[in-house]
Structures are given as structure tokens and as C-alpha cells.
Amino acid sequence: MKKIEAIIRPERVEQVRRALEELRYPGLTLTEVKGHGKQRGVRQQWRGKEFVAELLPKVKLEIATADEDAPMIVRAIVSAARTGEEGDGKVFVLPVDDAVRVRTGEGGDDAI
Amino acid sequence: MAGQVSAGDTAFVLAGAGLVMFMTPGLAMFYGGMVRQKNVLATLMQSFCIVGMVSVLWALVGYSLAFGPDCGHFIGSLAWAGLHGVGQAPNKDYAATIPHLAFMIFQCMFAVITPALITGAFAERMRFRGFVVFTVLWSVLVYAPIAHWVWGAGGWIRNLGALDFAGGTVVHISSGTAALAAALIIGRRRGYGDAVFASHNLPLTVLGAGILWFGWFGFNAASALAANGLACNAFVVTNLAASAAAMSWAAAEWVRHGKPTTLGAASGAVAGLVAITPASGFVAPLPALLIGALAGLVCYGAVQLKWRAGYDDALDVVGIHGAGGILGALATGVFASRLINPAGANGLVFGNPHLIATQAIAVGATVGYSFVVTVVLLKAVDVVMGLRVPEHQEETGLDMSQHSEAAYGF
């Protein structure tokens, strides 16, 4: 089992969700986060004074997948979330020891 | 005496009092949206509490001191303390066609909003207890005397012939000056200069600015104390000045930074409203447009000077109310016309160079008195109970440290 953590632009969430639905992987958890990679902050203005806001709003998606499905999901997310500009984000793949479905108590791959 | 009371005038002045009252919660939101989230409730609380505190104070002593029987052209007596003698019959000295109570309650709302304006200067670092004591003292020792000088029967500035239709000196210059004193005495916020403290809720600020604009129709037009042509003039020029100033401030940003901002447009509108306040019952529409356009530019410039000067007037009370009020008072000296208001005077443009000198005297006296007394009051409060919160409370935020509250549910 793998967990995919994808940090993407907030405005790309809908595209990514549609792509995941098509792959029959609609389940996800979304957190609103802030951060930056190499992307510079954005310039803002407050009553004539300019400043740079360095922590930018992003969205983190967490998706659990079977081992063999992870590469496909990652490709779909990357493709749907990409704009080509700096700040598009990153996707990480992490190992998962186990998962349990709360409603039924099922474990393992059946729980995803 | 019933025959002398005009229903139309009374209705209008009472509605005006309601509009001006609404400006204080509006101001609360204008300021509240501009501060950081951890301080929003404390900011709102200051304005909201002022409505309560000053309303009570006004009835007990404030109104009498400001408008009561004259003592030495400096202050009113306490003959009207507790609103004794202030009833349903008109008072001929102030407004012959409305009950005295209507005039009093209208003026009450001006007394309320003036100290609320000052809170913008010491936002995000003032101790609540110190704020309460300072505000009570300021209302009695600064607002009431200045109101008496400019508007009170027997007041020396009124006797000089200075013109202030709705409170350019009494409200804006007095509070703008006090704000400068407060910013200097209380000191800069921690971290000021390293970063700009970004506003946490500009939509709230814009809502507040809209409420201020709306309420200002009461502030200026109802200062005619009658539902008449003069009130209409004030209403119209108020709208024109606000509009011109919103656009000129935004234009200044557009030129200097490449983009106009919402905060700039909202701030500009307020600057225009401030500047037209003393002039609204004396100038015609076209001069009002010019006054507004200038106010947007002058106040924008005053804010830029603040960044250079280095004092921390957190929400630009000095730049908008101080500079805007002074501009408006002097512009009244230039553009006032007897054709608009026979009870006023002519200004420079209409062949009378003396009015602008009188206006300058009124400005100077207000600035001098407000600054000195405010400094004394702040120092006194600081010695007795401390003005500023300790460093760690400023870090955590005033909402938690002063009120044990969280604004948005965490």
C-alpha cells in the first residue's frame, strides 16, 4: 500500500479530482497548507508599501493506493495539476503499513 | 412651544444621529479588517465599548461641558449635567426647529466616533484598561473643550468666525493629532519595519468603508440641523468628495505601483469624506470635487511620509484624519461661499483672504491643544497602569491576552 501526498495549486483541485474519478480513485483528503519550494513569494501592496508574501497558499491531497496503482495515480495528478509555471507543486509517494475501513473493520488492500 | 418644532427637521436630525452612530461600528470593521487576525476582536471591542462609555459620559457631563452655558469662552458649565434642562423644547442657540434632545443626541454620536478614530493609531498593542481610562479622560478633557470652542455658544473659535460645518477640526484634526501623540508615546509594534503586517480581512475593511460613506451622509447633511436645501448641498458634496478621493488615491497607486488596490480605494474615499466634512455646508459641488481629488493625493502622500518618518501609526489616523482634516479646514477658507450658506462666510476665491487665516488659527489651536493634552494623559495613564501590553501578550495577540477570546472559532 502506498500513500500519495500531492501539494498542488488550489485552483487545480477540480482538475485533479476529475482525473482521479476517471481512474476509479475518488477517495482523498484535502488540507489547506502554505509553503514554497523554489518559487519566490508574491509582491503585495499595503497603502503604498510593497512587501513580499513568502508563504503561499497551496492544497495538500492525500490518497491511499495499492502498490501497483501508485505510478498511474501520480502521473494523473501531475498531468492534471501542471500549469508550467513555478509553484506547480510536488508529489510524494510514501509506504503504508496498514489501513482499516472504519465502517466495516476491513483491513489491508480491501480497505482502500 | 410645540408650533416651533418642525417634524421634517426633527425626523432628519434623528435619522442623522442614527447614521452617525452606525459609523462607529463601521469604523470598527474598517479597522478590524486591517489588523492581524489575533487582534481583530480587541480592535472591534475598543470601538464598540466607546459607543457605550462615551454615550453615558456625554449624558452625564460631556454635553454640558461642550455645549452648556459658556465659561470664559473655553468650556461649558455643568448646568446641564445629567441632561438637566435638556428637554423636548428647542434650544434657540443651537437649533430652533428641533427638540434640544435631538441636537444633544446627534452631537453625542460625534463625541462617540472621535475617540474611536484614535484607536487606529495604537492598534495591536494597547492595554484594555489603559485604553478605557485614556478614552474617558480624553473625551472630557480634549473633545469637550474643542467642541465648545468651535461649536459652543460663546466658544472662542466660533466667535472668531472660523467655519467647521460638521467636525473637520472638532473630530478629525483633534483625533488625528491625538493619534500622532499616541503613536509616538506608545511606540512601534514589535517587528515593525522588518515586515508589513498584512491585513487579515480586507473584505471587512471595505464593508466598513462603505458603512462610513453611508453614515457620513448623516454626519455632514444632518449637520444642517434641518431638512432643507443646505442639507442637500452637504449631502451632494459629501458624495462627490468621497468619489473623487477614492479615484485619486487609487490613481496614485496605479501610477506608483502599477496597480490600484481595494484598500487604497477604500482609504481614499474615507480621506475625501474627512476633507469635505468642515466644508460641506459652505462649498459648491465643483470645489468639492477638487477638495476630494486633492484629499486622495494629499492623504496618500501623508501615508508615504509616515513610512519615511518611522512612527507606527498603525492604521493611518494621522495621514487620513489629521492631514485630511487640515486640508479640509483650509480648503473651507478658500472655497466657502455665502451663496451656499448665508450664515457662513466667503473664502479666498470669493474675495475674502481673512477666512483662511481664521481657519489656520482654528487648526493651530486644535493641533496644539490636542497634542499637548493627549501626551499628558497618555503619560499619566502609563505611570498609573501601563499603556502597552507586555511583549509576549503582543505576540500572542490582544484577543487572547486582553479578552480571552478567539475571533474565528479556534
Image: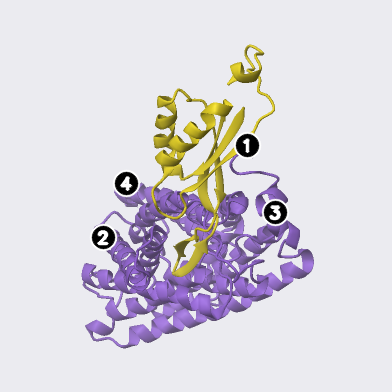
Residue B286 in the image: above or below residue B53: below
Of tags 2 and 3, which is closer to the observer? 3
Name the residue carrying label 2: B236
Residue placed most toward the observer, B368 or A84: A84
Looking at numbered disc 2 in the image, what kind of residue is underneath it?
Answer: Val
Q: Chain of mark 1?
A: A
Residue that carries the numbered disc 4 in the rendered image: B7
Mark 2 to mark 4 CA distance (whole Å): 23 Å
Q: CA distance from mark 2 to mark 3?
A: 45 Å
Quarter-wise, where is residue B292 in the image? bottom left
Say which residue appears at 61% left-offset and 38% top-offset: B409
Pointer 1 residue: A94
Residue type for callout 1: Leu
In this figure, which residue is indicated by the disc labeled 3? Answer: B396
Q: CA distance from mark 1 to mark 3?
A: 36 Å
Q: Which mark is residue B257?
A: none
B260 relative to B303, above or below: above
Q: Looking at the picture, do discs 1 and 4 lie on one chain?
A: no
Quadrant location of the C terminus of chain B in the rendered image: top right
In this rendering, position of residue B152 left or right of residue A110: left
Quadrant of residue B59 in the image?
A: bottom right
The residue under label 3 is which amino acid type? Thr
How far across and down, in percent of the image, does residue A93 sit?
59, 38
Q: Secondary structure at mark 2?
A: helix
Colour of chain A, in one word, is yellow
Disc 3 crowd, CA 10 A, few/some/many (<14, 14-19, 20+): few
What residue lies at 44% left-to-right and 38% top-to-bottom?
A13
Q: Is residue B307 above or below residue B171?
A: below
**Neighbourhood count class around disc 1 (C-alpha, 10 Å): few under 14, some 14–19, many 20 upward:** few
- Among the chains pictured, the one given purple colouring is B
